[in-house]
Amino acid sequence: MNLPVKYRPKTFRDVVGQEHVVRTLQNALRHRQISNAYLFSGQRGIGKTTIARIFAKGLNCEKGITPDPCGKCEICQEIESGNSLDVIEIDGASNRGIDQIRELRENVRFMPVKARYKVIIIDEVHMLTNEAFNALLKTLEEPPENVVFIFATTEPRKIPETVLSRVQRFDFRPLSANTLISRLKFICQKEHMECDDESLKIIFEASEGSMRDAISLLEQAYIYGNGKIEATTLREVLGIIEDEIFLKLFNTILKENTAQILRILREALSKGYSLFDFHKGLVKAASSLMEAILMGEQNPYTQFAGKFSEIDLLYIFKILKDMEQTLRLSNYPRAIFEYELIKLAYIKRISPARILSYQGEAEQKGAFSSMEKTINSDREKREFSNNSPVNKLIRELNLKEVRDGPF
Ligand SMILES: Nc1ncnc2c1ncn2[C@@H]1O[C@H](COP(=O)(O)OP(=O)(O)OP(=O)(O)O)[C@@H](O)[C@H]1O
Ligand SMILES: [Mg+2]
Ligand SMILES: [Zn+2]
């Protein structure tokens, strides 16, 4: 099926979310205030390439420069199918070098073949070498007429200041639960697929706001479940452990019952969850606990407000951090992971001063940075993408990832 490709928006109207980007680009087209270079930044699968192509159509549609490209004329169709000689997409990751950029500079000196503007879309532009960036900069300093560059990146911080200062930048946002879920519902309806609200919520959480991941996941779950999408199966395949287990774990920690703590972990492992799944779930649970305690948020962990202190939270996160290290580096991850977990039972016996000194030590060593990455909601900072539920599912089902080329 390849639903992400099938449901790639073809007009600005079809795009969901990213209203700030769409509105500004449509206004630019309407008033013909076209910049020479744009930067689209944001996590994967949220519409950067999609909007770049629609913008290219808006510049080149046979109707004239327009905020509502027709999608039907020859030029719009060629852009849509990736066959336009004037709209060129380059993958920055595999064309990183100076030679490729020189070739590109050569190319943009010529007038567009058929269209009004040459549009050069460079994906993952942060991957370019320094020399390549310098060469690109020369073009940006004296931009040829009728050429528009659109750079897309998931890591804007890796782009040199000199380039950043010459582009109009748009920060794309992860899609909100409402926006993403209603798009999934729309697709389900069109495809006659059934998916209940709980499953949709799980898909949203697993996709971390990426529309492409969410649609792929919907599709994979549909195939895996033989046409039936069920929350339980979804959770199993994604390695998502239910809150209930962690609520039980925190209660057991308060009771200092080490044997029971081990039993909880082993039960999860026997159900097929990995240590990594358990850790990930526990990080999420601890974050909810923190929100309940520090921010008074109402969630399943609110029952522990007053039972765990702020200092306890520091200790919990210190252990989570150690566990992460264990999972990465230890030759005996399971045994050491269990040892770390048991330490949680001693939470009330360790003096606050000692916990604070742990933190000091950890911070001095810069050890906290990797923990921050796990809990930080800033998607750009994530380094876990290889272990993201979607990737995991793809591996488990032995599926080839569907890269979405031109539709
Ligand atoms: N804002 C959106 N509205 C509707 N569909 C979207 C949106 N963003 C992404 N999609 C869906 O996800 C697919 C991939 O989107 P797109 O290629 O634009 O992502 P991207 O931001 O360029 O990601 P990457 O960084 O991986 O290149 C689209 O084909 C479409 O199905
Ligand atoms: Mg893209
Ligand atoms: Zn057109």
Image (cartoon, helix red, strand yellow):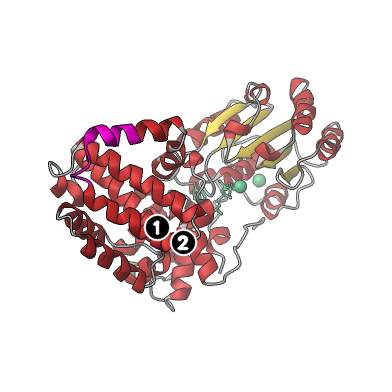
Q: Is residue 392 above or below residue 317?
A: below
Q: Is residue 392 above or below residue 254?
A: below
| Residue 264 located left or right of residue 322 | left
Horizontal and vertical percent position of residue 300: 19, 52
Task: Determine whether 194 is above or below 387 in the image.
Answer: below
Left-right relation of 81 to 30: right
Task: Name the residue located 23 percent from the left edge and 64 percent from the top edge.
Answer: 259
Residue 344 x, y percent position in the rendering: 26, 51
User: For disc 2, does the CB lie below 8 Å from ligand 1?
Assistant: no
Type of amino acid under label 1: Ile
Circle 1 — which element? helix
The residue beneath circle 1 is: 336
Would residue 111 be found to the left or right of residue 190 on screen?
A: right
Which residue is denoted by mark 2 in the rendering? 332
Q: Residue at x 39, y 43 (%)?
A: 375
Disc 2 secondary structure class: loop
Residue 350 is inside the magenta segment: yes
Contact between labelled residues 1 and 2, with CB atoms less than 8 Å apart: yes
Q: Is residue 276 above or below residue 383?
A: below
Check if residue 282 falls in the magenta segment.
Answer: no
Residue type at mark 2: give it. Tyr
- Give, as a single range, the part of the protein colored magenta: 347-358
The residue located at (34%, 57%) in the rendering is 339
Picture disc at residue 245? none
